[in-house]
Amino acid sequence: MSLADYLAKNYLSADTPKKSKKRKRKDASTAGLVIADDNVTGWDNSKTKDDDRRRPPVLTSGQTADFRKKKNSAWATISAPTDAEQADADAIIRQAAADNEAMGNAEDDAPAVVDEEEEPEKVGGLQLAHEVQAAAEKKRRSEKRRIERELAEGGTAAQETIYRDASGRVINVAMKRAEARRKAEEEERKKKEEADQAKGDVQLAMREARKQELDEAKYLTVARTADDEQMNEELKEVQRWNDPAAGFLTKAPPKPTSGASTRRGPSKPTYQGAFDPNRYGIRPGSRWDGVDRGNGFEKKWFAARNKVKDRKQLEYQWEMDA
């Protein structure tokens, strides 16, 4: 005996097999089943025999009774109505006609309510100008009457919105708006005064001059040609920084007061240190570094002129001595 058989015999317990219960099957012949074949006539040409939808249904014997012919027929025989039925139908028709006529008379006798707010009937086709104007005027009057009636019924107080503050007091909107308007005007006035104070005397003088020019313009003629002396003088007095002729065409300014500049007209910044003279009297520019990069012609030119002048002076003196 092997070791596995010994252990299985003495130490292991095998499960007893369970018996399976078999259901009792009834014989198909005793169940009363009827198989209906749809392909008796041979019209079924479908090749999918395995499709469940094409399989013939299995019907029990109890369900086949529904397809049997009923004993009582559902057909109703229609024949001509009798005299009594015809009389009842005529009475019902006469009563319905009388009720309809009475209802129509009651509606005709009722007072007609004219709705003024209803839009005027639209007329098709060609219309004249006065017809269109009359229709528009009628619509405008009806709209005006409707608005007046709504105001009279509801009142203006009902349409106004009531504003309240945190404590519940009613806020007067008109007063608040007027106060805000006054505050805005006051701020605008203060800003204008601050701007005027920030301007210098020159800007204020220019503004006054401009105001005076506008006042005098009311008396000037419309046509001003190139021969207008006043306009030409005004244009000549305008000083421009890039005018090349400003150095000799600009009029001399009035005598300056103490501490004021004595420059004549507009000029560019110049060199303020010492420099050698030249025959044209031109000062160096403000960016000159003080180094003379010329060939010394200006210096020799001045020396030659001075020599000629000294020679003439000496010759004159010698003639007087002789």
Image (tube, grey):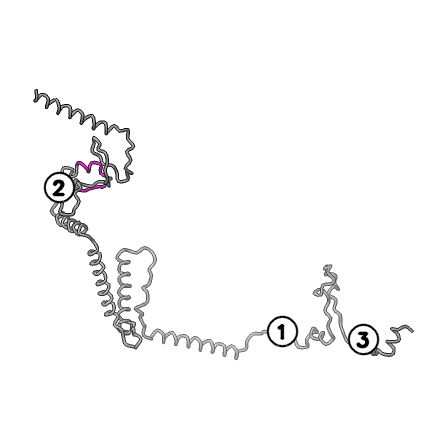
Q: Nearer the viewer, mark 1 or mark 2?
A: 2
Determine whether the residue tagged by mark 3 lies in a helix, strand or loop: loop
User: Which span is picked out in magenta?
Assistant: 238-248
Of all residues shown, which one is farthest toward the right? 1
Foreground pick, 276 / 205: 276
Quick one: quadrant of the N terminus? bottom right
Residue underneath mark 3: 27
Foreground pick, 319 / 171: 319
Marks 2 and 3, how far apart at CA: 139 Å
Residue 134 in the image: above or below residue 151: above
> Residue 196 sits in which quadrant?
bottom left
Quick one: quadrant of the C terminus? top left
Determine whether the residue tagged by mark 1 lies in a helix, strand or loop: loop
Tell me if residue 244 is in the magenta stretch. yes
Residue underneath mark 2: 230
Q: Nearer the viewer, mark 3 or mark 1?
A: 3
**Do tag 2 and tag 3 residues touch (Cβ < 8 Å)?**
no
Q: Residue at x 22, y 27 (%)?
A: 301
Badge 2 amino acid: Gln
Q: Residue at x 20, y 31 (%)?
A: 280
Badge 3 amino acid: Asp
- State the image coordinates of residue 270 (x, y, percent, origin top left): 24, 40
> Residue 3 sits in which quadrant?
bottom right
Residue underneath mark 1: 75
Q: Nearer the viewer, mark 2 or mark 3?
A: 2
